């Protein structure tokens, strides 16, 4: 029906969804999400009537990728710890075998290339008169007993050391420190084929 001339025309505002004003500005609403009553669907700009029987979209699942990053990081740290521990043990063993933990005085002759088999320090009774501790070390050398004997005869006959006696038949050299005669000891050389065992005992 055409309105009469001069009659006023009343415009009816377009219908709006019940959540347009309240929710369209809500950043939490995602495109495609249904309203709580299931009758409206947000298309990204406005609420549109939803299809009959539509159900609300399930909430988005949180990513758990950080858990795998955490597990992987812990695994890397564990591997690095094992490698570091193994290297530390190897270094200690190598240092011990090369005489790094020797109980002998720093100026005592150290046979080149000899490896440490055992080391022991005894404190208290059972040592020489005037002394309070005994250092006992066993070394192995790839050189012959004669070569090792010559080395200790030369080294213990110089510096602050002097040879008191030499028992070549049994391979025993007795020595003492010049600056402190109470510091005494023996070097016993045992031939093992082409190798030698060096037993050192020092009371100080």
Image (cartoon, rainbow, N blue to C red):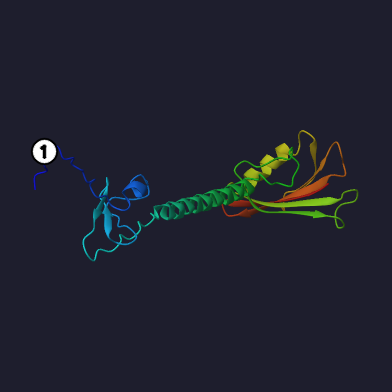
Residue 9 picture location, percent across and down = 18, 41
Nearer to us in this view, 76 or 14: 14
Q: In which quarter of the image is residue 111?
A: top right
User: Given the current orientation, which residue lies at the most extreme top position?
Assistant: 159
- State the image quarter where residue 179 is shown: top right
Is there any visible trace of residue 160 in the rendered image?
A: yes
Which type of secondary structure does the marked residue at label 1 adopt?
loop
Give the x, y percent position of residue 91: 58, 47
Give the residue at x 9% y 44%: 2
Return the residue nearer the eye: 127 or 91. Answer: 91
Closest to the observer, 185 or 92: 92
Which residue is situated farthest in the bottom direction here?
A: 53
Question: Which residue is identified by label 1?
Answer: 5
Q: In which quarter of the image is residue 192?
A: bottom right
* Tag count: 1
Q: Is residue 144 visible?
A: no
Q: Is residue 154 above or below residue 64?
A: above
Extreme residue in the left direction = 1
**Image location (x, y in percent) of residue 139:** 65, 50
**Quick one: 136 or 37, which is closer to the camera?**
37
Report the residue at 40% width, 55% height from top: 64
At 64% from the left and 46% from the top, the residue drawn is 146
Q: Residue 166 location in percent, x, y? A: 77, 46
10 Å crowding of disc 1: few (<14), some (14-19), many (20+): few
């Amino acid at each position: 029906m055409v309105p009469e001339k001069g009659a006023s025309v009343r415009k009816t505002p377009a219908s709006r969804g019940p959540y347009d004003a309240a929710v369209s500005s809500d950043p939490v609403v995602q495109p495609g999400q249904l309203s709580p009553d299931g009758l409206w669907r947000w298309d990204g700009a406005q609420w549109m009537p939803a299809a009959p029987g539509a159900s609300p979209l399930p909430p988005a699942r949180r990513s758990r990728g950080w858990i795998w990053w955490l597990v992987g990081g812990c695994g890397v740290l564990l591997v690095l710890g094992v490698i570091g521990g193994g290297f530390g043990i190897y270094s200690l063993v190598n240092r011990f075998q090369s005489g790094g933990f020797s109980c002998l005085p720093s100026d005592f002759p150290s046979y080149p290339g000899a490896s440490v088999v055992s080391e022991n320090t005894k404190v208290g009774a059972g040592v020489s008169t005037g002394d309070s501790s005994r250092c006992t070390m066993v070394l192995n050398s790839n050189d012959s007993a004669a070569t090792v004997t010559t080395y200790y005869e030369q080294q213990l006959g110089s510096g602050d050391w002097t040879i008191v006696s030499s028992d070549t038949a049994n391979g025993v050299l007795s020595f003492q420190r010049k600056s402190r005669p109470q510091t005494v000891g023996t070097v016993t050389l045992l031939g093992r084929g082409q190798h030698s065992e060096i037993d050192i005992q020092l009371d100080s």
